[in-house]
Amino acid sequence: MVLLSPISLLSLLLGIGLPTVSYILLKIFAAHENPAKNLPLGSMGWPLLGETLVFLKPHSSNSVGTFLQQHCSRYGKVFKSHLFGSPTIVSCDLELNMFVLQNKGKLFQASYPKSIHGIVGKHSLLTVSGNLHRKLRSIAVSFISVSKSSPDFLDLVQKLSISMMGSWNGCKQVSFFEQAKAFSLRLMVKNLLSVKPEEPLASRILEDFETFMTGFVSLPFNFPGTAYAKAVKARARLSSTVREIMEERRKGNINSNGGLLREREEEDFLDVILSKQNLTDEEIVSIVLDIMLGGYETTATLMSLIVHFLGHAPLAFHKLKVIYEAMRCGTVVKFVHRKALVDIKFEEFVIPSGWKVLPIFTGAHLDPDLHENATEFDPWRWTDNCKEMNKKIIALGGGVKLCPGSEFAKVVIAFFLHHLVLSYRWKTKPDECPLAYPYVQFRKGLMLEQFHRGKGPLRLFTI
Ligand code: HEM
């Protein structure tokens, strides 16, 4: 067994090399003791490790969790801490969060931890900024907006929904979260790469994506057998798969015997993107994986949250705003990572240049000052004041990184749920609960029980 000194352990945990540790220690303590800056109250926790582990402690996803609850009541909605290896300002304040998200990359920029760079690569939308971000983002945005209103895409969503539900015939239980992930990933790979849902390659991509996603919430120990190392490998395999399909396309989709490798009825995303002259192969692979990464688990999570909440509030079936309310109350994305580029004054505080800023979405979504009975799933709250409610929700981020996929997700989910509620009734286990890890997981996989075909007509379910 290898014993590590506390410093080496911390350097591993934070994904940095030993030589940088003493420099960082110096920086942290300098930041701790900067009397010129009027920092918000808070605690910095342990050197280097800060408060990261308590911050990441899983909790029910329709609550802010003990860490935020205790810190907000002790220090206020904006407080300082030390998270993911950096001195950090944590904000549960709607106004500050809007300000951070909506500025145009001049005061704040996205700043995901180094360990995430190691998984997503250096061309990912998560990690790039400035002109490269604008260039790659515009490609993702145009593809997503064309897809969501294309009749072929809607037909695909419909067919996949019906075939998935067909496969449940005779089942007394269905592990819904798993099914939702398979559904949304198969939809993505068909739409992006023309990989058919029934092809073994679709299952392999799904498996690699699951491993890839696990790495996001693992400690960045890059040695054999760890979740992090497996994620890095899964990302490399996914990248090779996309490259191979690209090569096929370039060779005209013809195999060595002169046969067609993969049939395509219509142009897919890869055809469109390959026709663009100004992208490197690495950038093409990265955009394809970014769209899958952005859209696959988020859509599946939101579908599952809705199914979970509806299991507890069946009357809400008839409510139009279940999608919005599940986004508010279940929190698909808990927070995003930003960094201040200059000293910024907010109210009486200063956010020092170079500090990390974490806008916490749950902070605003579950704030009792903003929402009555904030932790309750209540789609009725949207009925009369949808516009006002929208101003208090930041589930899709904002500014230059505003999620381009929200309408896409809504269309997919509305189609799927339309078929689900027309055909089925279900109950969930009484102790089932969505947990923020911080990505949502279901304690028992969201097992649907007493699962049977519904009788009698239900009203159409629309958004
Ligand atoms: C179900 C609901 C969804 C939620 C709650 C959600 C949430 C978010 C959030 C909060 C961000 C901002 C990240 C940041 O500021 O650092 C984001 C970005 C992004 N999302 Fe979504 N998302 C959803 C669905 C989708 C779908 C379906 C797609 C693709 C089809 C997608 C693609 C993307 C992409 C490509 C970005 C990166 C944008 C950029 O960096 O400029 N999302 N999403």
Image: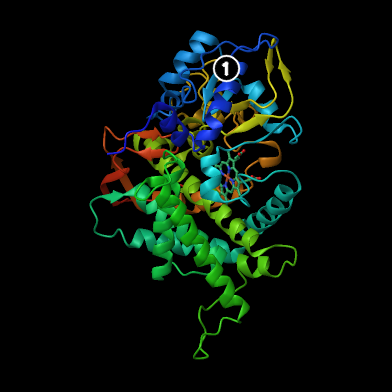
| Residue at point 38%, 69% (across, down) | 200
Can residue 90 be seen at all in this image of the molecule? no
* Quarter of the image with the C terminus in it: top right
Q: Is residue 70 above or below residue 240?
A: above
Amino acid type assigned to the residue bearing label 1 in the image: Phe
Q: Quadrant of residue 359?
A: top right
Q: Residues within 10 Å of mark 1 (few under 14, many from 20)?
A: some
**Image position, residue 91 (x, y; %):** 58, 22
- The residue wearing badge 1 is 29
**Image position, residue 242 (x, y; %):** 54, 66
Whether residue 452 sits left or right of residue 190 in the image: it is left
**Image position, residue 125 (x, y; %):** 63, 48
Can residue 124 be seen at all in this image of the molecule? yes
Q: Quadrant of residue 106?
A: top right
* Quarter of the image with the N terminus in it: top left
Q: Is residue 155 above or below residue 254?
A: above
Residue lying furthest bottom:
257
Q: Quadrant of ligand 1?
A: top right
Whether residue 109 sits left or right of residue 298 in the image: it is right
Q: Is residue 461 above or below residue 272?
A: above
| Residue at point 32%, 46% (across, down) | 425
SS of the residue under disc 1: helix
Whether residue 68 sits left or right of residue 152 in the image: it is left
| Residue at point 69%, 53% (across, down) | 136
Residue lying furthest front:
19
Q: How is the image coloured?
A: rainbow
Ligand 1 contact, mark 1 (Cβ < 8 Å): no
Residue closest to the eye, 108 or 323:
108
Residue closest to the eye, 387 or 188:
188
